[in-house]
Amino acid sequence: MAFVEHLTLFVLAAFLGYELITKIPATLHTPLISGTNAISGITLIGSVLVAGSGNTTLATVLGFFAVVLATINVVGGYLISQKMLKSFGRRRGD
């Protein structure tokens, strides 16, 4: 039963995330990315704790994949935020 509940929560979160991203104007994407980076940082800390707990091999493997994916999300978010902030900055000669 717990698997079905977790799967339902995952599907609802994915649907909500898709609807949220598609409905928000482009000018608000940078603050939204900053917020999701903070959440991904929390996810990264939790996944490091799970991977390092060593309770079971499955938990270690899943924790490792969570660390990799959260790291990719955090780094990608910062790179995109930096690129978007540069587009709002002054250009040389202005």
Image: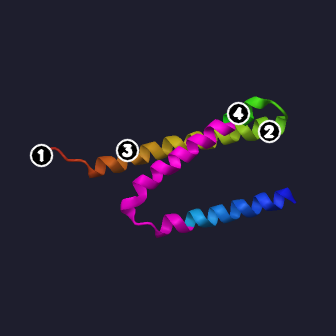
Q: Nearer the viewer, mark 4 or mark 2?
A: 4
Q: What is the CA distance from the residue labelled 4 to the residue labelled 1?
A: 49 Å
Query: Which mark sits nearer the N-terminus, 4 or 1?
Result: 4
Prevailing secondary structure class for the magenta stretch in the rendered image: helix
Which SS class for mark 3?
helix
Query: Disc 4 or 2, which lies upstream in sequence?
Result: 4
Q: Amino acid at mark 1?
A: Gly
Disc 1 is placed on an element classified as: loop
Q: Are marks 4 and 1 in contact (CB under 8 Å)?
A: no
* Crowding at mark 1 (Cα within 10 Å: few <14, some 14-19, many 20+): few
Do tag 2 and tag 3 residues touch (Cβ < 8 Å)? no
Across and down, in percent, residue 24 comes to 44, 66
Report crowding for label 3: few under 14, some 14 to 19, many 20 or more residues within 10 A (C-alpha): few
Q: Which residue is mark 1?
A: 93
Measured as percent of width and height from the top left, residue 76 is found at 49, 45
Q: Residue at x 29, y 51 (%)?
A: 87
Q: Secondary structure at mark 4?
A: helix
**Amino acid tagged 2:** Ala
Distance in Å between CA atoms under marks 2 and 3: 34 Å
Label 4–label 2 contact, CB within 8 A:
no
Residue numbers of the magenta segment? 19-47
> Which residue is at 57% across, 39% downward?
71
Question: Where residue 49 is drawn, which disc sits there?
Answer: 4
Please, what is the three-letter code of the amino acid marked with disc 4? Leu
Q: Amino acid at mark 3?
A: Gln
Q: Residue at x 51, y 46 (%)?
A: 37
Q: Is residue 63 left or right of residue 22?
A: right
Question: Circle 3 is placed at which residue position?
Answer: 82
